[in-house]
Amino acid sequence: MTLKPRLLWGGGVFVAAMVIAAITLMWKPAIVPIIPPPAASFDAQTRLAGARVVALGDCIVCHTAKGGQPFAGGLPLATPFGTIYATNITPDAETGIGTWSLEAFTRAIRYGIARDGHLLYPAFPYIHFTRMSDGDISAAYAYLMTRDPVKATAPSNKLIFPLNFRPLLAFWNVLFLRPGPQASDPSKDPQWNRGKLLVDGLGHCASCHSPLNLIGGEERGRAFDGGVVDGWEAPPLNALGAATKPWTQAQLVTYLRTGRASEHGAAAGPMLPVTRDLAAVPEADVQAIATYLLSVQKPQPAATGAPAQSVALSTDVQNGAVLFAASCAQCHGPHAPMQSIGERPTLAFSTAVNATTPRNVIQMILGGINWHGEDTMNYMPAFNQVYSDQQVADLASYIRATYSQRAPWTDVEKTVENIRKENDAR
């Protein structure tokens, strides 16, 4: 046999093997549907435990569209590959999970496979949820199956080719899914182990706070190094000690439960509803989360950059000063009432103001923080219809120059323009 036929034969074997592997990975049997069980079939204690699990997993955050019914789906989730719409997880028999057995629900949580056998997109963080215990999965199932059923079908996903071809997810799962619960570390105390389980599993913190590779998987070895979610920067969780005021356990717990920390700032964007969920769970859970997060800190280089006064005379900073006096100083200025009584932290400590990019400051200026009724802890009006790109950039540059000792941001106006386009596309 000559070299060329050998190569062809070898290539054919390889292709055939890949096809067989693909068929094996792609084909998943459907699980027989059930008649939706009556709510009374789930005991009150299990439902209560499920409410805690669902809150820790932030399920309502992703599975509730703006103005929609809780858990009824339809929320657009922006990804680098297009838009995925969250599904309906109410017990509606036609459009939700009403016909799903506990077995089907567990398979979805552990393996990312729907009841009918189709593969779920990893915007649903099953690669983290897979670490949940059987008891937590059963409790979450009981809670969700006793919600009010809502008939609602999510819009079709809008993904680029070939990522809109679901069977390809089988290969993605081979690379990134490690199914099953994780064992406790006997060298650590119960609080640390509880925190690790919540952060790495149910809370799926790394799915937002880690950079993604070209195919949407979390970069190996870079967990908690920071990411971008829905146009907001999810800051590194392993650099909390490098903040202008290093985070303490008490501050982190307060922030996670109230959305505000006295020496760091206020939650906004995708993080704000997470803090509302964490306010509803026992404080012991949040203490455990904080304990684990503070244990994964990396050594950080010392902050460098020009001091604020060296850029204070630039035109953009001067223009920004006028805008700040007109629109921001009432709350954020040094003599504002909320500053003097300590309810609002100085911008000098803000994670967003001291970040490497102006993304979150720009998002705050453009979108503010919506009023959320009587339980509102943080509120800020939006200025997206008030200021031009240049004015938003000038304001951001002034805030950076005045309140941070780190280097000035560059290309701020271009960043504003890009963020407006991203927001308009959602």
Image (tube, grey):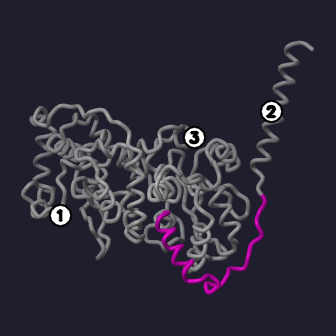
Task: Give the answer, above or below, for where 87 lies relative to 363.
Answer: below
Residue lying at 62% horizontally and 45% vertically, measured from the top left: 163
Q: In the structure shown, which secondary structural element does the residue marked by tag 1 occupy?
A: loop
Choose the circle earlier in sequence order: 2 or 1: 2
| Image quadrant where one finds the N terminus | top right
Q: Position of residue 351 (x, y in %)?
A: 28, 48
- Label annotation for residue 343: 1
Residue that lies at the very extreme toward the top in this rendered image:
2
User: Marks 1 and 3: which is nearer the front?
Assistant: 1
Magenta-drawn segment: 29-57
Residue lying at 30% horizontally and 74% vertically, measured from the top left: 375
* Distance between mark 1 and mark 3 Cα atoms: 43 Å
Circle 3 packing at 10 Å, graded few (<14), some (14-19), many (20+), is few
User: Marks 2 and 1: which is nearer the front?
Assistant: 1
Q: Which residue is mark 3?
A: 215
Q: In the structure shown, which secondary structural element does the residue marked by tag 3 occupy?
A: loop
User: Mark 3 belongs to which amino acid?
Assistant: Ile
User: Mark 1 belongs to which amino acid?
Assistant: Glu
- Between residues 241 and 315, which one lies in front from this camera angle? 241
